[in-house]
Image (spheres, rainbow, N blue to C red):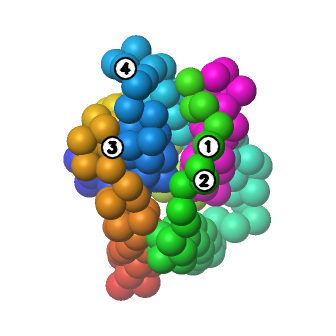
């Protein structure tokens, strides 16, 4: 149960980038409908599942080397990813006058990769915390799918107001989980 809650927290933290992008896309491209929102959520969820898998297997390759320091590695990686998200959340970026259409396949691929890069580093952390990576990656992907769809709907209704605040919250969640892992191993 503890592992499921930890992975859910990680999934929520990781999904904040995709959630923020979905809010912006919903706000800027109001003409796009439910099918686009579902397609975007599917892409984001799939990439958020794939990246931790890749990071997990890379981390397993180094497990013998870092096994003694695994809690420090988990803490540092989550703190760095979370800190980066908090920093980016404070950078207020304006949407360009003519942004690229996020409904194209190329745009969805680029956005999916960009919002899931952090999940690669978290996958390395997961290799130190869990043996059930399929469950972890599936849960992260599902959480991202649901939050991305909800973000798109919120964007259509509430606009650009929430974008940077969501990313800050996601970063703080990851930092908190990293601190929790470190404290549990130290004490």
Secondary element type, mark 1: loop
Q: Which residue is mark 2?
A: 96
Which one is in front in this view, the residue at disc 4 or the one at disc 1? 1
Q: Earlier in the sequence, mark 3 or mark 2?
A: 2
Look at the image and give the residue range highlighted in magenta: 104-123
Q: Earlier in the sequence, mark 1 or mark 3?
A: 1
Q: Residue at x 32, y 50 (%)?
A: 159
Q: Residues within 10 Å of mark 4 (few under 14, many from 20)?
A: few
Q: Which residue is mark 1?
A: 99
Up the image or down, 14 lies above or below 93; here it is: above
- Alpha-carbon distance for marks 4 and 1? 17 Å
User: Does residue 156 appear anywhere in the picture?
Assistant: yes
Q: Earlier in the sequence, mark 4 or mark 3?
A: 4
* Residue 34 - label: none
**Residue extending furthest toward the top:** 35
User: Does residue 71 appear anywhere in the picture?
Assistant: no
Q: Which residue is mark 3?
A: 155
- Alpha-carbon distance for marks 1 and 3? 15 Å
Q: Which residue is mark 4?
A: 33
Q: Earlier in the sequence, mark 4 or mark 1?
A: 4
Secondary element type, mark 4: loop
**Residue extending furthest toward the front:** 97
């Amino acid at each position: 149960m503890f592992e499921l809650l930890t992975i859910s927290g990680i999934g929520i933290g990781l999904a904040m980038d995709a959630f923020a992008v979905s809010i912006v896309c919903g706000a800027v491209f109001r003409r796009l409908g439910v099918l686009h929102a579902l397609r975007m959520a599917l892409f984001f969820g799939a990439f958020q599942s794939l990246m931790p898998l890749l990071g997990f297997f890379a981390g397993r390759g180094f497990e013998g080397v870092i096994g003694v320091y695994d809690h420090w590695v988990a803490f540092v990686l989550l703190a760095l990813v979370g800190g980066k998200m908090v920093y980016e959340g404070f950078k207020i970026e304006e949407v360009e006058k003519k942004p690229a259409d996020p409904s194209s396949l190329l745009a969805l691929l680029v956005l999916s990769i960009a919002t899931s890069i952090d999940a690669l580093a978290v996958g390395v952390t997961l290799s130190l915390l869990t043996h059930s990576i399929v469950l972890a990656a599936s849960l992260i992907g599902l959480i991202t799918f649901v939050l991305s769809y909800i973000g798109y709907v919120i964007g259509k209704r509430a606009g650009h107001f929430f974008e940077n605040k969501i990313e800050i919250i996601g970063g703080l969640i990851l930092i908190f989980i990293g601190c929790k892992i470190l404290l549990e191993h130290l004490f």
